[in-house]
């Protein structure tokens, strides 16, 4: 049996009923741009007007209102990663953040339904932490190059090759991989997690660049896997130097999934949450965000006065999540993520060890 069963409900509107809740079958709401819709979505538009022209907002606003109305009916919450497009991030998300923030909020959620706006491993993590909740993934094909780079069988082979060496898995992995590892980490806590194990040598998988950047910040010997993020691995140190010459005074803020020649050129390297905090605290006149480019659109509203230089590398998986797909998931209660209970129980240990780690 595979680690994850993917359940799709057809657009006929038939489907299971939520326990104690409304029927999962519902009609698609009217999607017209009316005065009421304009008024009820005005606050959201104020947050995105710097990146979404006024002429385009009428195409988004009816979906924003319909999704927000349906969330209340379903007792649903939307978790959105920092790489979501602005109309999702500012228009319908209840909780936004990086992988660690979303994992923690998933564990605390009191909603009956969690809609995961990100990629598939994030939805699996939410299900691992909330086995009795309904987890919806608006597009089941929204995967991740890192998660696809390694399997549970690969991890078992690593254990055989390196007996006694603890294995830390980046949260960007499948439930099957998490189940084979000792503890999870994110880009924001990878050094802390590695050092918490008290071992002289640690396997940090699957991102080779995160591992290399962690190795520069700890005395622990780091072994890794040759996985990489298709967005971050495309950046180069030479490209960063070209930007510095072309944009005098620019501050480079990089993600640790980038190659080390990129992070060596950066003024700050950290998780998406860390990057946002650094920008808010330092407020540089010009900033180059070396990560998925939707993030600059999303945080521009929170960092007024910062001129963002956008080296736009888009994640094709993140961009599979759209307002129409989110609405369809909530209307028909389709695309539910189910993790094999036996695998989920083992994976939960690794995830909760990360969440419960004391600084």
Image: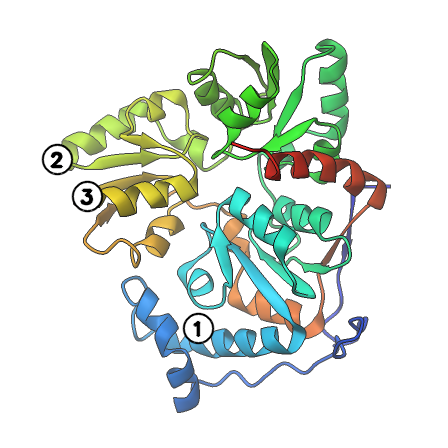
Quarter of the image for residue 108 reads: bottom right
Closer to the observer: label 3 or label 1? 3
Q: Which residue ends up furthest to the bottom in the rendered image?
A: 35
| Figure check: 333 above or below 169 | below
Q: Position of residue 127 (x, y in %)?
A: 71, 51
Q: Secondary structure at mark 1?
A: helix
Q: Residue at x 31, y 24 (%)?
A: 237
Q: Residues within 10 Å of mark 3 (few under 14, many from 20)?
A: some
Q: Residue at x 62, y 18 (%)?
A: 203
Q: Position of residue 220 (x, y in %)?
A: 53, 12
Q: Which residue ends up furthest to the left in the rendered image?
A: 248
Quarter of the image for residue 222 reads: top right
Mark sitting earlier along the chain (3/2) = 2
Residue 312 in view here:
no
Q: Residues within 10 Å of mark 1 (few under 14, many from 20)?
A: some
Q: How many marks?
A: 3
Q: Which residue is mark 3?
A: 286
Q: Which residue is mark 2?
A: 248
Quarter of the image for residue 3 reads: top right
Q: Nearer the viewer, residue 146 or 67?
A: 67
- Residue 60 is tagged as 1
Q: How is the image coloured?
A: rainbow
- Direction from residue 277 to residue 30 in the image, left or right: right
Mark sitting earlier along the chain (2/1) = 1
Residue 54 in view here:
yes
Q: Residue at x 30, y 74 (%)?
A: 54
- Direction from residue 19 to residue 261 in the image, left or right: left
Q: Residues within 10 Å of mark 2 (few under 14, many from 20)?
A: few
Q: How far is mark 2 from mark 1, CA to CA?
A: 37 Å
Q: How far is mark 3 from mark 2, CA to CA?
A: 9 Å
Q: Residue at x 55, y 69 (%)?
A: 324
Q: Secondary structure at mark 2?
A: loop
């Amino acid at each position: 049996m595979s680690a994850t069963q993917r359940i799709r409900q057809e657009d006929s509107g038939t489907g299971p009923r939520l326990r104690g809740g409304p029927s999962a079958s519902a009609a698609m709401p009217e999607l017209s741009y009316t005065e009421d819709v304009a008024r009820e979505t005005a606050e959201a538009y104020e947050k995105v007007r710097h990146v979404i022209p006024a002429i385009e907002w009428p195409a988004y606003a009816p979906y924003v209102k319909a999704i927000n109305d349906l969330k209340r009916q379903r007792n649903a919450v939307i978790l959105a990663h920092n790489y979501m497009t602005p109309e999702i991030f500012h228009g319908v998300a209840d909780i936004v953040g990086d992988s660690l923030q979303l994992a923690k909020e998933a564990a605390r959620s009191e909603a009956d339904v969690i809609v995961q706006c990100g990629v598939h491993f994030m939805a699996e993590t939410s299900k691992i932490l909330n086995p009795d909740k309904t987890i919806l993934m608006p597009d089941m094909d929204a995967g991740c190059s890192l998660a696809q780079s390694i399997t549970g069988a690969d991890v078992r082979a690593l254990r055989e090759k390196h007996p006694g060496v603890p294995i830390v898995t980046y949260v960007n992995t499948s439930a099957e991989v998490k189940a084979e590892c000792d503890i999870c980490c994110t880009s924001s806590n990878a050094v802390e997690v590695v050092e918490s194990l008290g071992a002289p040598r640690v396997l940090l998988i699957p991102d080779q660049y995160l591992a290399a950047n962690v190795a520069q910040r700890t005395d622990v010997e780091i072994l890794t896997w040759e996985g990489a993020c298709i967005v971050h691995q495309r950046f180069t140190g030479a490209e960063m130097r070209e930007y510095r010459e072309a944009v005098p005074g620019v501050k480079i803020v990089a993600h640790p999934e980038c190659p080390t020649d990129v992070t060596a050129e950066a003024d700050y390297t950290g998780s998406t949450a860390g990057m946002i905090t650094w920008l808010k605290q330092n407020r540089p006149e010009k900033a180059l965000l070396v990560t998925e480019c939707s993030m600059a659109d999303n945080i521009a509203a929170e960092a007024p006065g910062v001129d963002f230089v956008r080296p736009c590398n888009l994640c094709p998986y993140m961009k599979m999540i759209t307002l129409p797909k989110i609405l369809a998931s909530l209307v028909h209660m389709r695309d539910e993520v189910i993790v094999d209970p036996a695998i989920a129980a083992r994976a939960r240990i690794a995830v909760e060890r990360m969440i419960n780690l004391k600084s």
